[in-house]
Amino acid sequence: MSERVAPVSFAPPTSRRTGEPMQFARKALGVSAVTAVAATLWVGLAAPASAHNKTWTAACDTKTGKTTVSVDLTYYNADKANTVELKDNDTELVAVTNFPDSFKTDKTVAGDVAHTFTLTVKAWDDTDGKKGFSFTQKQTVPACVKPTSSSVAPTSSSVAPSSSAVVAPPSSNAPSSSATSVTTSPAAVAAATENPLANTGASVTLPLLLGGGLLAAGAVALFAVRRTRRNSGQ
C-alpha cells in the first residue's frame, strides 16, 4: 500500500528583526514623553520656589506732589520665616516684619523734601547674602515740588499769639504801679509829719530845764531870806 503524504504548506518566515525597530521606537517615545512631563513639573514647581524675585521702586510724582516707594518680593522659600525692613532716612516705614514666600507694600510720603529709602531683606536660606536673596539696598529720591505757601502760614499765625502775649503783661502791670505809688505816698507823708514832731520835742525840753533851774534858785533865795530874818529877830 502506498502511504499518503500530507501536503506541506510553506509560509514565508517572519523576520524578528523587522518588528524590533518598531517596538524600540514605541518604548523610546514613551520614555521621552514621561521625561518631558516630569521635567515640566519640576520646572513649574521647583524653579519658582528658588527664584526669590525682588522688585522695588521709589519715585516722586510732580502731579500729586508725593513720593511713593513700592516693594514686591515673590517666590521666597516659605519653609522658614524671612524678614523685611524699610526706612525713610531714619524713619521706619516698615518695621522688621516676617513674611513667608511673598511681601508687598506701597508707602507714600511728602514730595517737597528729599528721601533716602533703605530696604533690608534677609532670607533664611541665604544668611550671608552670597546668593542675592538677602540684601540691603538704598534709593535716593530728590524733592520734585517746592514747599507750598500754606505750609508757611501756620508759622506766622503761631507767632501772632506770642506777640500779643508779650504785650499783655505790661498792661496788666499798670494798675500795680499805680497802687505802689498810692501806697508809698502816705508813708512819705507820715515820715514828713514825724520829723517836725521830733524837732518840736527837743525845743520844749530846753525851756523846761531853764524853768526848773529858776524855781530851784528862787527856793534857795527864799530860804536864805527867811533865815536872815530869823537871825535879825533874835
Image (cartoon, rainbow, N blue to C red):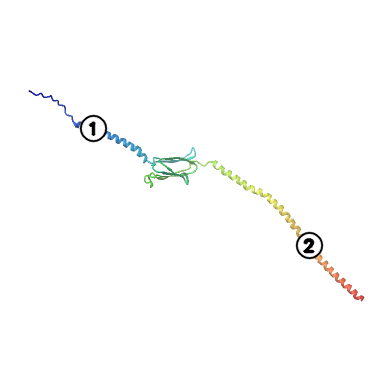
Look at the numbered discs 2 and 1 and tell me whether their residues touch, using CB distance below 8 Å.
no
Residue farthest front in this picture: 1
| Viewer-nearest residue: 167 or 70 | 70
Check the picture and name the quadrant holding the C terminus.
bottom right
Discs 2/1, front: 1
**Can you identify the residue that label 2 sits on?**
201
Q: Amino acid at mark 2?
A: Gly
Quarter assignment of residue 86 = top left
Q: Position of residue 27 (x, y in %)?
A: 25, 34
The residue under the point 60% across, 45% down is 161
Q: Say whether residue 138 is left or right of residue 210.
A: left
**Can you identify the residue that label 1 sits on?**
23
Give me the C-alpha separation between circle 2 and circle 1.
157 Å
- SS label for mark 2: helix
Q: Amino acid at mark 1?
A: Gln
Residue farthest left in this picture: 1
Residue farthest right in this picture: 233
Q: Position of residue 57 (x, y in %)?
A: 43, 41
Q: Residues within 10 Å of mark 2 (few under 14, many from 20)?
A: few
